Amino acid sequence: MSNVFLVSLSFATASVIWGKGALLSFSEGHATIHLNKDNPLFRQVQAAARKLDGMSLEGIKLDGSLWDKELRWAFSQGFYNAKKGANIDFSELDPAQLQNLTAQKKIVEWVRETINLGPEALAPNVLCDKAVKLIESVLPEGIAISHKIIEGEDLLIENYQGIYQVGRGSTRPPCMLQLDFNPTGDPDAAVDYALVGKGITFDSGGYSLKPSGSMAIMKSDMGGAATLTGALALAIVNGLNKRVKLYLCCAENLVSGHAYKLGDVITYKNGVTVEVLNSDAEGRLVLADGLIAAQEDNAGIIIDAATLTGAAKMAVGRDYNCVLSMDDQLAELASRCAKQENEYLWRLPLEEFHFQQIGSSFADIANIHSGEGMAGASTAAAFLANFVINPQSNWIHFDLSGSYQLSENGLWATGGKGHGVRTISKMLFA
C-alpha cells in the first residue's frame, strides 16, 4: 500500500491545540485517536474513522499495541464509504485472527456493496446468483451446498403466490432462492435454522406510488436478503456445523398494465387469503411465501429479516435494528448477541391484539392495518405471524431499520451498513 497514513490509539488526552476533549490529533503522516475509558471504545474508534474518511486518505495502517480485533473492526466500519471501500492494513495481529477479520470484512462489504448497487444492476435473479456465489466462496473444503431458484411462472406452479403477484408488474421475473447448507452430509438431517429474507430489488410502491424522495433509496429494499446471506456466510467462516436453509424472496415492485392492484385478493399456499389495500406494503407479501417454505422443510427456528416498515425507523431511527417476537427466549438471545457483537437492537411489541388490527371485509386479513394510531411495525409482524404455524415459539422477525444510512452521520457513510450481520450470524451458534 503506497502513501500509507498511520493511525494509533492512546488513552492520553489530546493537546488543547486540537480542541478541548479532541478525539483526534495529528502529526506528519500520522493520527492519534484519543480514547476516553468512560465511553464505549468501539463507538469512539468508529467515529474517528469517519472523520479520517473525510480527509481523502489513500490508505490506512493501524499502528501500535492497543489495537485489538474489535477495535480494528470498528475502524474498518467507520472508514468505509461506497466509492472506495475501506483500504486498511490491519497490521500486527495473530494470523488466525487476521484471517477471520479479513473474511468478515469481505463478507460485510459484500452486503454493503450489494445494497448499494443500482436497481438496473441487481435484478431479482442476479441477487439470487450473487448470494449463491458468496456462500460458495466461503465453504470449507469438502462441504458443498445445494440450491434452486424458482423463477417467473414456476412460482405459480409451486404456488408461491406472494412473490409472483408482487413481481409480475416487472419485465424481469420475480424469484425465490432456496439454498441448503448441510455440513452434516446427511440428507435427512434436521434443518436447525431457516433464514427468510426480503429481496425487493427496487420498490416503486406499485400503484401506491412512492414520491421521488422516498423512492430514490429503494434500491436498498433488498437489505434483508443481503443481511441474511452475509450472516450465513460469516457463520460458515466461523465454523458453523448446523444445517441452515436460506430463502430469498425476490422481486421488483413496479407499475405496469400487469402489476397487482389494490383490491386484489391473494390466496396463499397455506390457505390464508389476503386483501391488498396498499401495494407499497409488499415486503410482507413476499416474506409470507418464504415462511411457508421454511415450515415445509420443518425448520427448527425461523429468522426472517426485512427492511419492512417506516414505522420501525420512526421508532428507533437508523441507528438500531428492531426485533419482534412472541418467543421471549429467542428475543433475549437476539439482544444478547447484538450486545456481544457491538450492534444495536431494540425489541418492539408483538401481542395477540395486534392480530386483530389487520382485518379485511373480503379476505382473512389485509396487508396493512386499519384505522389511525396503529403500530405499523407490530401489525406488519402480526401479518407475518399468520404464515407461521406456531408464532408463539421459535420464530423471530427483524425489521432492519439500521441496514441503510440515508445520509452520512458520525458513525456511518451513506448507503448500506451491514448492521445486523454479526448479530444474526452469532444466533446461529446458539
Image (tube, helix red, strand yellow):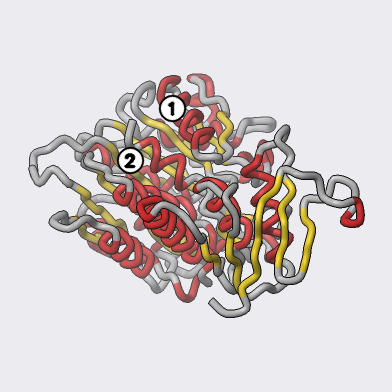
Q: Between residues 386 and 423, which one lies in front from this camera angle? A: 423
Report helix, strand or loop for mark 1: helix
Residue at the spot of label 2? 291
Q: Say whether disc 2 or disc 1 marks the residue closer to the N-terminus.
A: 2
Image quarter where the C terminus lies is top left
Report helix, strand or loop for mark 2: helix
Left or right of 362 in this view: 294: left
Left or right of 363 in this view: 142: left
- Callout 2, which amino acid? Leu
Q: Between residues 326 and 184, which one lies in front from this camera angle? A: 184
Residue at the spot of label 1? 333
- Where 96 falls versus 122 (above or below)? above
Residue 320 location (% of width, % of height): 61, 40
Residue 106 location (% of width, % of height): 43, 62
Q: Can I make out residue 146 in this image?
A: no
Residue at 53% over, 76% down: 1
- Is the Cβ of the residue at disc 2 closer than 8 Å to that at disc 1? no
* Mark 2, other Cα within 10 Å: few <14 / some 14–19 / many ≥20: many
Q: Can I make out residue 34 in this image?
A: yes
Residue 100 location (% of width, % of height): 38, 53
In the image as oriented, which residue stretches furthest toward the bottom? 2
Q: Between residues 157 and 135, which one lies in front from this camera angle? A: 135
- Residue 287 is marked as none
Residue at 65% over, 51% down: 46
- Where 258 falls versus 327 (above or below)? below
Residue 105 location (% of width, % of height): 46, 58
Q: Which of label 2 and label 1 is nearer to you?
A: 1
Which quadrant would residue 191 be assigned to in this image? top left
* Mark 1, other Cα within 10 Å: few <14 / some 14–19 / many ≥20: some
- Callout 1, which amino acid? Leu
In the image as oriented, which residue stretches furthest toward the front? 65
Residue at 55% over, 65% down: 88
